[in-house]
Image: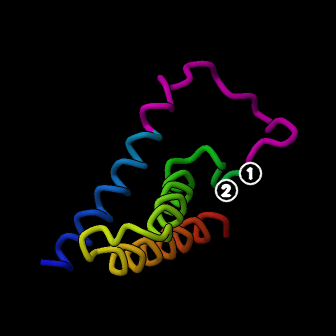
Amino acid sequence: MKRNLTVLLTTGALIGALSAGLAFAGPPNTVSAPSTPAVGAPRPGSVPQQSAVYRAVKALESAKLELQQPGNNFGGHKEAALKACDQAIKQLELALETVKK
């Protein structure tokens, strides 16, 4: 039961973070891009800080900080939730690294 709740909370956090990114993304840009990238523009294959995956990592780090605050044990799920955050952050960072290469 505890593991199921941890998986559910982690999945919910990831979905929330990713869908929040989609909500702020706005409509697709219909203007054609210039043939040469602008100065400071992300390289092809790089992940800009505005990407949903990058924001998901930041959201999980924020959730982890909140979980680390003293006082609330979150119904006995605090430790498992912290571990799940660590695992999710690690996997997302590995995914970001593969895009950067």
From the viewer's perspective, tell me whether residue 8 is left or right of residue 61. Answer: left
Question: Magenta region's main secondary structure?
Answer: loop
Seen from this angle, which residue lies furthest front? 71
Which residue position holds label 1?
A: 43
Instruction: Name the residue at 47% across, 76% down.
Output: 86
Which residue position holds label 2?
A: 46
Seen from this angle, which residue lies furthest right? 39
Provide the residue span drawn in magenta. Answer: 22-43
Instruction: Name the residue at 54% across, 74% down.
Output: 94
* Quadrant in the rendering for residue 81: bottom left
Q: Nearer the viewer, residue 27 or 43?
A: 27
Which image quadrant: the C terminus? bottom right
Element type at marker 1? loop
Q: How many numbered tags mark residues here? A: 2
Residue 30 % position (x, y): 55, 19
From the viewer's perspective, tell me whether residue 38 is left or right of residue 61. Answer: right
Asked if the residues shown at circle 1 and circle 2 are in contact, with their CB atoms under 8 angstroms apart, the answer is: yes
Residue 17 % position (x, y): 42, 49
